[in-house]
Amino acid sequence: IKDDDINKKTGCSTLYQCLDIKDYGYSQGGIYNRNGAGVEISYYPDAWDHPNRYSEYNRNKWGVEDHKVMSDKVNGYKFRKVFAPTDAQIKACMYLIHGYKKAFPDLELKFPRDDNEEFLSKTVDEAQKYGLLHHFNVTSRKIDALGFPTDLVEKEVNRMHKEESRKRKNFLDKVFGWLKA
């Protein structure tokens, strides 16, 4: 999901599908690539080393959107300054996850959480590697997606799914009502 190619009508970043859905390719996820679709969000979170990476000058030069600066914690490490994905990239992720749920109805729209329902921003046990995952949930060698609004995305894709289910139910109720009449 790139940060320099935004659809003006939808406000979403463009999604690039590199493989057919029936295929899979091993990348950073190694053996976990076979368990689900992997998504790369194209941005550099390294505000700690390159604070001017998304300066106004560089945004104009490279044609990219602004990236918010925030702090994040992954695998026990506190990152004081990270660039987050753009709003358009986050929106594209939401629609992509929503599309996966349509294609795979058994997909649980939930990131790994502890007993108190707090998001686990660390590598998780095998039993918790289901539903929605960040790369750092799969392996301790990864820190992405830093700055990703996990709670917001989970809440929004669940809302989208419920809204669509409600619309589908209302439509089917009308159809079956007509058939009974």
Image (tube, helix red, strand yellow):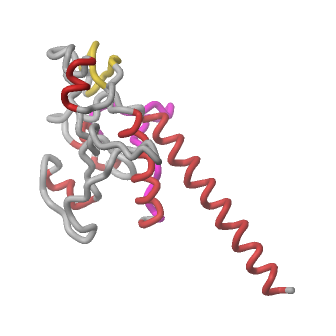
Q: Residue at x 25, y 25 (%)?
A: 59
Q: Is residue 40 visible?
A: yes
Between 169 and 133, the one lying in front of the other is 169
Residue 141 vertical position relative to residue 101 in the rendered view, above or below: above
Q: Quadrant of residue 67?
A: top left
Q: Residue at x 20, y 29 (%)?
A: 44
Position of 160 with respect to 25 (left or right) is right
Q: Position of residue 158 (x, y in %)?
A: 54, 48
Report the predominant secondary structure element of the magenta stretch: loop
Residue 35 falls within the magenta-colored stretch: no
- Numbered marks: total: 0
Residue 116 vertical position relative to residue 80 in the rendered view, above or below: below
Position of 4 with respect to 163 (left or right) is left
Q: Is residue 110 visible?
A: no
> Which quarter of the rendered picture does the N terminus lie within?
top left
Between 12 and 125, the one lying in front of the other is 12
Q: Position of residue 95 (x, y in %)?
A: 44, 51
Residue 117 falls within the magenta-colored stretch: yes
Q: Position of residue 33 (x, y in %)?
A: 20, 56
Between 145 and 6, the one lying in front of the other is 6
Q: Residue at x 87, y 86 (%)?
A: 181
Q: Quadrant of residue 51?
A: top left
Q: Position of residue 64 (x, y in %)?
A: 27, 32
Q: Which residues are magenta?
A: 105-124
Q: Quadrant of residue 3?
A: top left
Q: Residue furthest right?
A: 181
